[in-house]
Image: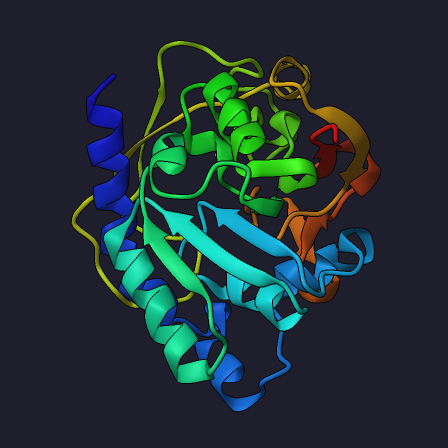
Amino acid sequence: MASYFDLNRAHWDDRAPAHAASPDYAFERFLADPHFLSEVVTFDVPLLGDMRGLQGVHLQCHVGTDTISLARLGAVMTGLDFSGASIAEAKRLSARSGTPVEFVESNVYDALGVLPAEGFDLVYTGVGALCWLPEVGPWANVVAGLLRPGGRLFIREGHPMMWAIDETRTEDLVIGYPYFELQDPLVSEDPGTYVATEAEFTHNVTHWWNHGLGEIVTALLDAGMQLTGLTEHQSVPWQALPGQMEQVDLGEWQLADRPWRLACTYTLQAVKPA
């Protein structure tokens, strides 16, 4: 189990420069327009509410485009990620775009060792984050530990039903992976990435886990959080099931055939009791 961290970090270190250079992460648009927001955060805005003046932390922030977008909505943001290469790209974008954000390199499980306990009004986590964690229980305890009383968690994440679909089976929806959290990781090897790039990569093996929706909710409840919202969406911000999806607004993808068959993502909100 100890090797999953090094394998996955090498994978993201390898891809961070290519992601920053890809038009899909829109670094140039952030530099050209001080009001530009990522499509992911733009999707979140109706549920996010007023961000002005909030102290926020974005866990597993990757190259920082969503973190910077939240700062542009008025929050005072910190971003945290275990990939040093990703943090370097995020710091570069923050400096060049004139949007101040503090970026910190750390494993999310160790966040309370590098960030202030009860120091934040908002913990934000974006799509494609929890799947890299072997257990959601310790993650939920970190979230609760970072939040001030009355603070809230906002997470939009890939739905565990979508993660369970075998993306290599293009003829129909086929459940090929576990829905529930298992001790042993799922092991994938992919020489590419999810953005447009001609870069070639060296570190292509990853370990990942699914976590059932009930497991995630229960972990947060066990950490003392109170659930305040749970919305399921039929779209996801990348082509998660190649050959079966069509692109819609805000760079989102949904099933081309009867998209109401599959919840692709969900938005969960919870508060730490005052």
Residue closest to the eye, 50 or 23: 50
The quarter of the image holding the N terminus is top left
Task: Return the residue nearer the eye: 167 or 95.
Answer: 95
Colour treatment of the image: rainbow
Which residue does the image show at 34% across and 53% down from the upper left? 104
**Residue 125 visible in the shown view:** no
Position of residue 196 measured from the top left corner of the image (x, y, whole percent): 42, 66
The image shows residue 124 at horizontal and vertical percentages of 59, 46
Observer able to see residue 194: yes
Along the horizontal axis of the image, is 224 left or right of 139?
right
Q: Quadrant of the C terminus?
A: top right
Which of the 4 image quarters holds residue 160? top right
Q: Quadrant of residue 151?
A: top right
Name the residue located 74 percent from the left edge and 48 percent from the top edge. Answer: 256
Which residue is depicted at the point 71% across and 65% down? 52
Residue farthest to the top, as pictured: 183
Q: Position of residue 27 (x, y in %)?
A: 45, 76
Q: Taking 77 as reference, is 273 above or below it?
A: above
Could you tell me residue 98's position as x and y percent? 47, 83
Q: Is residue 175 above or below residue 132?
A: above
